[in-house]
Image: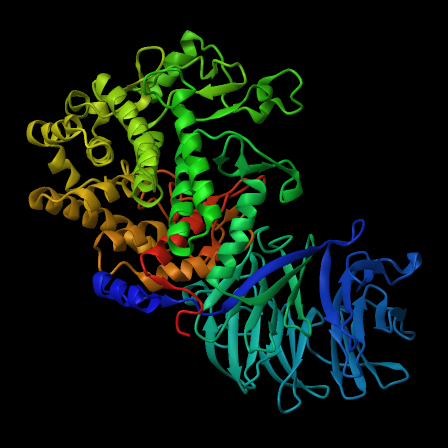
Amino acid sequence: MTLTLLLAFAHLVHGAPPVQDTPFVQEYREFHPLPGGANDVRGLAFDGEGVLWAATAEGVFLLSEGVWRAAHDAESAGPCFTAAASPTGGVWVGAWNGVWRCSGGKAERMGGLAEPVSALAFDGASALAFGPRGNWRFDGKDWTAFGGKWATSSRDTARDSTGGLWLSTAHGLYLLEGERIARHLHKEEDLLTGDQLSVTVGPDGLVWAGGYGGIDVYRGEKRVRSFSPREGLANLEVRRLRFHPDGTLWVCTGLGVTRWNGSSWSLRHSLRWLPSDDTRDVAFDRDGAAWVATAEGVGVIRRRMTTLAEKAAHYYDICMARKVREPWIVGDSRLMVPGDVTSNQHEDDDNDGEYTNLYMAMEAFRYQVTGDPDALDRARKAFDTMERFQTITGTDGFIARTMVPVEWAGPDNPNPSRLHDANRTHTAREEAQMLVDNPRHKTVEERWRPSADGKWLWKGDTSSDEMSGHFFGYYIYYKYVAQTDAEREKVARLTARVMDYLMAGGYTLLDTDGTHTLWGVWAPERLHGDGNWRAERPVNATELLSYLKTAHVITGEERFDRAYRELISRHGYLELARAPKPTAPSERTDIDSDLLVLALPALLMEEHDPEFRAAYEQGLRQWFGQVGAANSPFFNFMCGALGVEDFNLEECVKFLRDCPLDIIHWTVDNRARQDLRLVRYPELYGWQTDRLPPADERPVMRWDKNPYDAVRGDGGRSESSGVFWLLPYWMGRHFGFIAPPDAGN
C-alpha cells in the first residue's frame, strides 16, 4: 500500500487527518561565561562589525572569536551599568567612571566626564548621558552638563517617532523634548508602577515601558494596554524591553526572559535556557540569535529550522551514544558534572525493565515505518535482555528489576553510590516507622543477589510497573517484531513462564524469599478483601486481565483464557476495568496512567467478545477523560490507535515540536511564575500548576510523572534517554497520525 493510501486509511479509521511534518523553528541555547568574577553582566550591545560588548560589574569586556577578554585596564576596573549601540557603529558603555567608547576591538574612556552613567541616548552626532549626579550632552568633542527637574535615578531611554526622548526612572516615566519635560507619567491611572526600569519603541511606533509592576503600552501619551500576570506576564519585575528584528518583544525579568509575539507569551527560564533567571539585558546578532545578560554570565538562544524527523534523529543519536548499557538496557544516565554530557555514567533504575521495553517498542514501530534492519536488530537485542531479566533469577518465572555488573559494587569502584539501594539491615524501630507510614510495607534487606555465574548482580522486589512493562513488551514484540516461528516460540515460552509463575503464586509475585513483593499483588482476595489495596483495585484488575489476554494470544494456551474468564465471571474484574483510573486526588497518580497505557492495548486489540470489548472501550474513555487534556503524545496516540476519535492530535504534535533539544534533567521551578496558580490538583501531593505550560517551559517529561508538577529536575545531574519522545513519534508515524516530511510530494 502506498504512503498516500496509508494516510488516507488512517484518516478514515481514526477520524483525524495526519499532521504533515513541515519545518518549524527549533530554539536551543549556548552559554558564554566570562572569566574570573565578571559574570555579573548588566548590559550587552553589538557594534557595527558584529562584535559583542558587555558591561559588567568588573568592567568592559568583548567577545572575540568565542573568547571573552577585558577591554579595560586594571586601574579602570569597576562596575558598568549599561551598553548601547551608537549610530556611528560603535558601542558606548556607561560606567562608574563615565563613558567608554568601544570599537575596532578596543575600548577607551572618554575624557571630560568622570561621574557614574546609568543610561545613554543618541541624537544624530550628539549623545546624552544620565546618571545619579546629573546629565551630560556630548557634542562630538566635549561633554557639557545640562539641567532638568526629572529624577536622576535613570535606567533606560528610547526615542519615539517624533524625536521625543522617553526616560525611565525610579519615580516614573518622563517624555523629554530637549531639556523640557513634556510629560511625566507617575500616577496609578497612567501606569502600573512608578518604579520604571526600561522603555523601548515598537516597530509600529508604540511606546512600551516596564518596571516593578508589569508593562504599559502607549500610543503617543495615551496608555492603550497593560500587561501583568493576569494577561500572561510570568514575572512582574521587568528589567529590560527590546524588540527582536522579527517584531517579537523580548522582556528580561527576575525570572528569565519572556517574549510577546503579538498574541501570546512564551518563557525561557532555568538552566535549560539561561545561566541564571536573573536577567538584565538582551541584544540580537545578525543571525537573529538573542544574547542575554544575566547575573551568571551570557546565554544565547539560537534558532534553526528543523522537522520532527530530524529531531527524532537527534534524540536517537543521544540514546545510542549514551543510554545503552550491557547487555542492552536502555534508560536515563547520570552526569557526574551537572550538564556535562561528556561526564555521562550509566546507573541502575528500579524500572530498567519497563524502560527498556518501552525502548524496544520504539524500535519495533521504527522498524514498521522504515524497515531499517538496525531497528529490527536492536529490538531483538532488547528482547534478549528481557529474557535475561527472567533467567538471571534462577527461578521458574520471576523477573528481576534490573541487573548490573558485579564490579559496580566492588571495592575498586571509584563511585560506590553508583549502585542504588544497597543491601542493608533494618532496626525494629525503622521497620515500625515504615509500617506506620505504609501498612503494606515489606522490609527487603537483600535487594541485590549474585547471578549463578558470579558476573552480575540482579535486583529483586519487582513491582507491578515492571510486570506491566514486560507484558507490554512481550505483546509489542510478538505483534510487530517476531518474524519467524522460532522467534514467536521464544516469546511464547518466556510469556508462559512468567504468567505461570504469577498464577502459581495466587496472582501475587513471589520473590525468592517466598513472599510477594511490595507492589506485586493482583489476587482477588487482596484487591477485594484488604482495604489497604482499595486504591489500586481497578488498575491492578485491568493489569491482570491484560497479562492473561497477552499470554493467551501469544501462547494459544487455553489455561490463560480460562483464568481470564474466571476473573471476569467470579471476581468482577471486568466491572473494575470499566473505570480503571482512580480519580480522587488522594488516590490519583500518573504512575497509574502509565500502567494503563501498557495494559489497554492488548485488551482492546485482541478482545473480540462484544460485551468484554464494550467494557474496555468504556474504560479507555474513562482513562482518556482523566489524562487527555495533558496532551501526552504517548497516551493520546495510544488512545487514538485504540479508537478514541478526538485525541488532540495537533496539541500532541505541538508537544513533540516544543520539546527542547537539550533533554538534561535541569530543575525547572515554576512556583515563582506569577502567571500561574499553585494548586493541589489533579493530585493531592505536591504543588502543581493550574494550567499546563508548553513543553519547553516545564521539566523534561517522563510519562509516569505528573506533567502539572510545579517543580521537578535534579539540577542537570542526569539526562533522559529520549524514549519519552521517540516512542510516541514512531507510534504516530506507524498509526498514520504524523505524515513524513516528503509525504505531500
Q: Height in image: 76 above or below 128?
A: above
As drawn, the residue found furthest toward the top would be 428
As drawn, the residue found furthest toward the front would be 485
Q: Percent position (x, y) of residue 706?
A: 38, 44
Which residue is located at x 23 percent, y 51 percent? 642
Left or right of 82? Residue 431 is left
Q: Percent position (x, y) of residue 713?
A: 51, 42
Q: Quadrant of residue 30?
A: bottom right
Which residue is located at x 58 percent, y 44 percent? 321
Q: Quadrant of residue 285?
A: bottom right
Left or right of 262? Residue 595 is left
Which residue is located at x 30 percent, y 36 percent? 485
Along the line of sight, the residue nearer the viewer: 55 or 442 = 442
Q: Height in image: 319 above or below 646?
A: above
Q: Is residue 67 visible?
A: yes
Which residue is located at x 21 percent, y 61 percent? 13
Q: Percent position (x, y) of residue 435?
A: 34, 17
Along the line of sight, the residue nearer the viewer: 141 or 18 = 18
